[in-house]
Image (cartoon, rainbow, N blue to C red):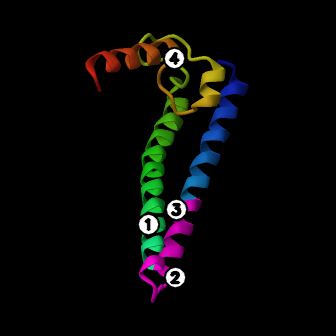
């Protein structure tokens, strides 16, 4: 992979990380700053549903943070963009679509087929 591609992905991953952390901080502020009292049970249920959805979203982002940090570590180690199964280079278009991926499209497809066969 060319150095300019590596630099591009380093910036992309850091920007993704910054955006997720900022959104998490905003969520925390919103949840702690707004003591909401609803007279109508339907309004309360809607607010709780929205809060639950937001927390699930933040939990997914928490997992993504770990993957982003691992991808940045792979960049530092010089292994970013190398498939962990076949050790071939992962294509730039695949990395642009999923910058935290550790598998080339061929190996990812193979794993998904194996999971389907096992019924996972």
Q: Which mark is residue 105?
A: none
Mark 4 → mark 3, Cα distance in angstroms: 30 Å
Instruction: Provide the residue designation for mark 2.
Output: 33
Element type at marker 1? helix
Mark 3 → mark 1, Cα distance in angstroms: 18 Å
Circle nearer the viewer, 3 or 1: 1
The residue positioned 51% from the left and 82% from the top of the image is: 33
Vertical order, 14 against 83 (above or below): below
Q: Residue furthest left?
A: 118
Circle nearer the viewer, 1 or 2: 1
Element type at marker 2? helix
Please tell me whether residue 36 belongs to the stretch shown in magenta: yes
Instruction: Provide the residue designation for mark 4.
Output: 104
Element type at marker 4? loop
Vertical order, 93 against 7 (above or below): above
Mark 3 → mark 2, Cα distance in angstroms: 14 Å
On-image quarter of the N terminus: top right
Who is closer to the viewer here, 60 or 16? Answer: 60
Q: Which of marks 1 and 4 is nearer the N terminus?
A: 1
Instruction: Provide the residue designation for mark 1.
Output: 49
Mark 1 → mark 2, Cα distance in angstroms: 18 Å
Mark 4 → mark 2, Cα distance in angstroms: 44 Å
Circle nearer the viewer, 1 or 4: 1
Q: Do the residues labelled 4 and 2 touch (CB within 8 Å)?
A: no
Q: How crowded is mark 2: few (under 14 residues within 10 Å), some or many (20 or more)?
A: few
Q: Position of residue 23 (x, y in %)?
A: 57, 61
Instruction: Provide the residue designation for mark 3.
Output: 24
Q: How crowded is mark 1: few (under 14 residues within 10 Å), some or many (20 or more)?
A: few
Vertical order, 78 against 54 (above or below): above
């Amino acid at each position: 992979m060319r150095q300019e591609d590596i630099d591009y992905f380093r910036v992309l991953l850091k920007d993704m990380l910054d955006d997720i952390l900022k959104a998490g901080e905003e969520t925390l502020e919103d949840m702690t700053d707004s003591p909401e009292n609803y007279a109508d049970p339907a309004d309360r249920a809607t607010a709780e549903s929205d809060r639950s959805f937001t927390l699930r979203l933040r939990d997914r982002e928490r997992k993504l943070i770990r993957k982003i940090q691992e991808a940045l570590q792979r960049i530092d180690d010089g292994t970013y963009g190398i498939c962990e199964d076949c050790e071939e280079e992962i294509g730039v278009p695949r990395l642009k679509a999923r910058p935290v991926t550790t598998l080339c499209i061929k190996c990812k497809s193979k794993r998904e087929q194996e999971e389907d066969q096992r019924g996972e």
